[in-house]
Amino acid sequence: MTADAWVVVGLCAVSTATIKGIGPFALGGRPLPAAATRVIALLAPALLAALVVTGVFSENGHLHLGDEAVGVLAGGAAALRDASILVCVVLAAVVTAALRALT
Amino acid sequence: MRRTVPLPSATAAAPRAAFRRGVREGAPFAAASLLLAASFGVLAVDAGFPELAVVVMSAIVFAGSAQFAAVTIIAAGGGPGAAALAATLVNSRFLPMGIALGPSLPGGRWRRAAQGQAVVDASWVMAARPDGTFDRHYLFGNTGIQYAGWLGGTVLGVVGGGLLGDTDALGFDALYPTFFLVLLIQEMRKGRGRGVAAAGAAIALVLIPLTPPGVPVLAASLAALIGLRRTHRPVPPSPTEGAT
């Protein structure tokens, strides 16, 4: 287990550095065409929405719906009311924990 | 081009000011990262990782969702190869993000690749300018303080995990999606990309049961390609004027 853990750490470090570095390594110094710029501006909403969806509805490769969905909704509602991100995440955890304690 | 023509204020003090602004605006995200990292520390130790390995992982990998993915697979009895592959897939979104960032970084290839390590989700989103370029000093400051939060939180989780008990009972699994949801809401307030966000969410949802972890998120990035056909629409803040 100990050896496996260190192998995981090493592999993850190398792959993360490679993935993060490869774009800047290959592309630099010149401005992107306008079409590419528009695509880039739209990457963030696409990726973030997918991260929310997988975070809430994915468990070990299966779709699932649990108490945390309600917590995340509460956190989102707080964000819409301009709460700081710390308040939002703490609220999400508290609501989720409360639901689990009650059920 | 705009990257070589300094703004009137872009001399000397501007990078430092941008860095400090990044630190300031990254601070709430760093606090949230601290909580996330604490839950990661607890999970990893529970999965059987040596305490030192957990801290080193946060220090040199510094990619929260990938670290969660890797440790979850080990905890479920998977091997190190499968764990690293899952982490790589989860991290694959940094590939398009790095491609977007590249042209905003100065220096040779290796120097740009080194600067590219500073990308995390929140700082990348927040450092983006309307014209498609990125404020790298802001990015460094924003990521820097989140790094401190992530590493500090990991140490807290590893050392104090026993005190926390069952992190699922505490609702810690709601932290990560909420973190991303808040970022998404901030992004939506810029007034663009709602349809793309909906499309990305739909793609991810459909692929969750069909593909390995990470693929749904990477595939969702394809929704941004809709930007290719928007040439006929007036883009609200023109990317080509006003930057210099």
Image (tube, coloured by chain):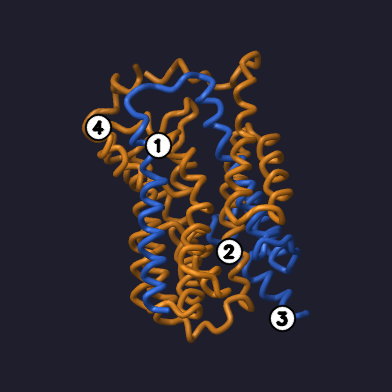
Chain colours: A blue, B orange
Question: Element type at marker 3?
Answer: helix
Front label number (2 vs 1)? 1
Q: Pointers 4 and 3 in contact (CB under 8 A)?
A: no
At label 2, which amino acid type do we have?
Leu
At label 3, which amino acid type do we have?
Ala
Say which mark, if any, is on residue B107. Answer: 4
For marks 4 and 3, give the CA distance: 54 Å
User: Dot 1: within a 10 Å radius of its alpha carbon, few (fewer than 14), some, or many (20 or more) residues?
Assistant: many
What's the residue at 54%, 31% (across, down)?
A: A41
Residue position for label 2: B175
User: Dot 3: within a 10 Å radius of its alpha carbon, few (fewer than 14), some, or many (20 or more) residues?
Assistant: few
For marks 2 and 1, give the CA distance: 29 Å
What's the residue at 33%, 75% (across, down)?
A: B52
Residue position for label 1: A23
At label 1, which amino acid type do we have?
Gly
Question: Element type at marker 2?
Answer: helix
Q: Position of residue A87 (x, y in %)?
A: 57, 61
For marks 4 and 2, give the CA distance: 37 Å
Say which mark, if any, is on residue A101. Answer: 3
User: Dot 2: within a 10 Å radius of its alpha carbon, few (fewer than 14), some, or many (20 or more) residues?
Assistant: many
For marks 4 and 1, give the CA distance: 14 Å
The chain ID associated with circle 2 is: B
At label 4, which amino acid type do we have?
Gly
Question: Element type at marker 4?
Answer: loop
**Res B190 → quadrant:** top right
Q: Are marks 2 and 1 on the same chain?
A: no
The chain ID associated with circle 4 is: B
In front here: B127 or B46? Answer: B46
Q: Position of residue B64 (x, y in %)?
A: 47, 60
Front label number (4 vs 1)? 1
